[in-house]
Amino acid sequence: MAASLLRKSVTGVLQVPRLATNFLFSKSLPVLAVEPARCASKKAGGTVRNKKGRTKKKYRGLKAQDGSFVHSHDVLATQYGLRFYPGENVLLDPDCTLRAAYDGIVVISTETLNPYPDSPLYAPTQNGLVLQKKFIHVIPTPLHGKFRLLSET
């Protein structure tokens, strides 16, 4: 009924008569609410595939070979767990990355593991189990010994 009262002018603008505005905005009559209808649509995203066998390489392993020169805090090995153990002058990061503590020559050796008492490997080694593990050491370069006092310069 209200739609029949609305007219378009020549310019295309809706003209609402005064009587229709009173009808549309009166407080005594209920206002009809228009609810939008939902249309069917595709979900966003593709199909889920398992990543097994297609994961990206992490490039873990030895980064400095035996006999090579490294600077302090250079990465010697990246690993998942302890495949290589830290030796002399080698730092162990929380993610088990081995770093050089000083400038020097890298030495990789195989040694018998002697774990701390709170280690889970302590009891088997006390019962006679011999564990051979690879250790990475850094032999620091010797100091040159040519020092001058500041007063002599």
Image (cartoon, helix red, strand yellow):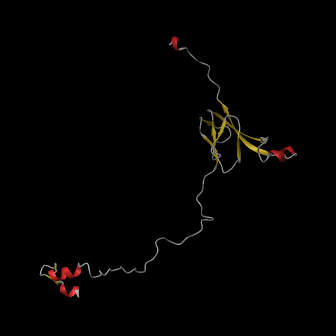
Q: Is residue 18 visible?
A: yes
Q: Residue at x 58, y 59 (%)?
A: 56
Asked where in the image residue 111 lies, by quadrant, the reply is: top right
Total numbered labels placed on residues in the image: 0
Q: Give the answer, above or below, for where 79 lies relative to 149.
A: below
Q: Give the answer, above or below, for where 72 lies relative to 29.
A: above
Q: Give the answer, above or below, for where 15 lies relative to 81.
A: below
Asked where in the image residue 84 lies, by quadrant, the reply is: top right
Q: Give the answer, above or below, for where 137 lies relative to 84.
A: above
Considering every residue shown, the one lying at the far left of the view is 10
Q: Give left or right: position of 113 versus 17.
A: right
Q: Residue at x 72, y 41 (%)?
A: 135
Considering every residue shown, the one lying at the far top of the view is 152
For the residue pair 82 and 59, the one nearer the viewer reads as 82
Q: Give left or right: position of 23 versus 120.
A: left
The image position of residue 119, as x and y in percent, is: 76, 45
Q: Residue at x 59, y 39 (%)?
A: 74
Q: Give left or right: position of 88 versus 130.
A: left
For the residue pair 50 and 72, the one nearer the viewer reads as 50
